[in-house]
Image: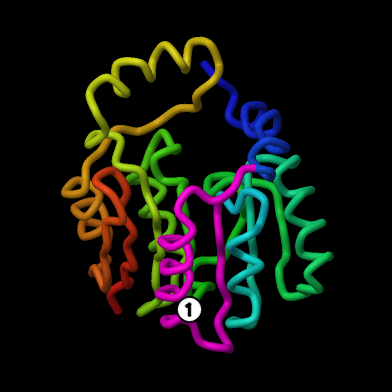
């Protein structure tokens, strides 16, 4: 079984140099998210990677705690934030399970391109719900592995065996929406940039 930390540490340099695949969709996601933000908000991002999204959002909120399992990813993120002159982001290594965070302490939680990489998606959503203040938002952008072409799903186990693909959880749009609803969220906004990607802004019920 692939060790996630080692996989993403090894992938970090190449990941940092890779261009955004769909720049228009990415910018739209940033804009929609920022429409929900308030200047006094505390934001938590898990799976922040090399920090680009946190840095883009930093001017629109009071503080961001940006975390990732990979120390190599975070080293790049810290350099990028420093170079951009951004001072209201704190980077910390860890996962939703390992980080000691106070319940109901964040106005927004960001989980971007990360839910499908987790082994227990529903537990992660429950943890996000616990960390949010009532009325807070959970912003996610997710690959719907269950809706990918069948040949990709057939090739995935082989790629994972050879260590060139991480763990991927298989769920579809209806299943993800159901997990959010079952854990106390209402869907504020949803958009599918493609058949296999889903962007959601979900609100924690008061």
**Residue nearest the observer in this picture, 103 or 152:** 152
Residue that appears at 28% across and 50% down: 194
**Residue nearest the observer in this picture, 190 or 42:** 190
Total marks placed: 1
Q: Which residues are magenta?
A: 18-46
Magenta residue check for 24:
yes
Where does residue 173 sit, x and y in percent of width and height?
A: 21, 48
Where does residue 95 sit, x and y in percent of width and height?
A: 58, 46
Q: Which quadrant of the structure image shows residue 63?
A: bottom right
Q: Which quadrant of the structure image shows residue 57?
A: bottom right
Secondary structure of the residue carrying tag 1 is helix
Residue that appears at 70% across and 33% down: 9
Where does residue 93 sit, x and y in percent of width and height?
A: 70, 48
- Taking 195 as reference, is 202 above or below it? below
Relative placement, left or right, of 117 versus 14 is left
Relative placement, left or right, of 69 versus 37 is right
């Amino acid at each position: 079984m692939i060790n996630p930390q080692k996989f993403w540490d090894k992938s970090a340099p190449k990941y940092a140099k890779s261009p955004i695949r769909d720049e228009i969709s990415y910018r739209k996601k940033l804009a929609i998210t920022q429409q929900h933000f308030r200047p006094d908000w505390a934001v938590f991002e898990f799976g922040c990677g090399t920090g680009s999204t946190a840095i883009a959002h930093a001017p629109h909120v009071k503080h961001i705690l940006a975390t990732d399992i990979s120390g190599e990813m975070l080293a790049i993120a810290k350099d990028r934030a420093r170079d951009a002159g951004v001072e209201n982001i704190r980077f910390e290594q860890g996962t939703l399970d390992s980080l000691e965070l106070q319940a109901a302490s964040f106005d927004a939680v960001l989980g971007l391109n990360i839910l499908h990489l987790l082994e227990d998606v529903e537990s992660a959503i429950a943890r996000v719900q616990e960390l949010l203040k009532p009325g807070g938002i959970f912003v996610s952008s997710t690959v719907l592995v269950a809706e990918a072409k069948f040949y990709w799903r057939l090739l995935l186990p082989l790629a994972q065996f050879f260590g060139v693909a991480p763990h991927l959880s298989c769920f579809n749009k209806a299943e993800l929406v159901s997990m959010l609803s079952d854990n106390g969220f209402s869907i504020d906004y949803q958009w599918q940039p493609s058949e296999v990607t889903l962007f959601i802004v979900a609100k924690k019920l008061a």
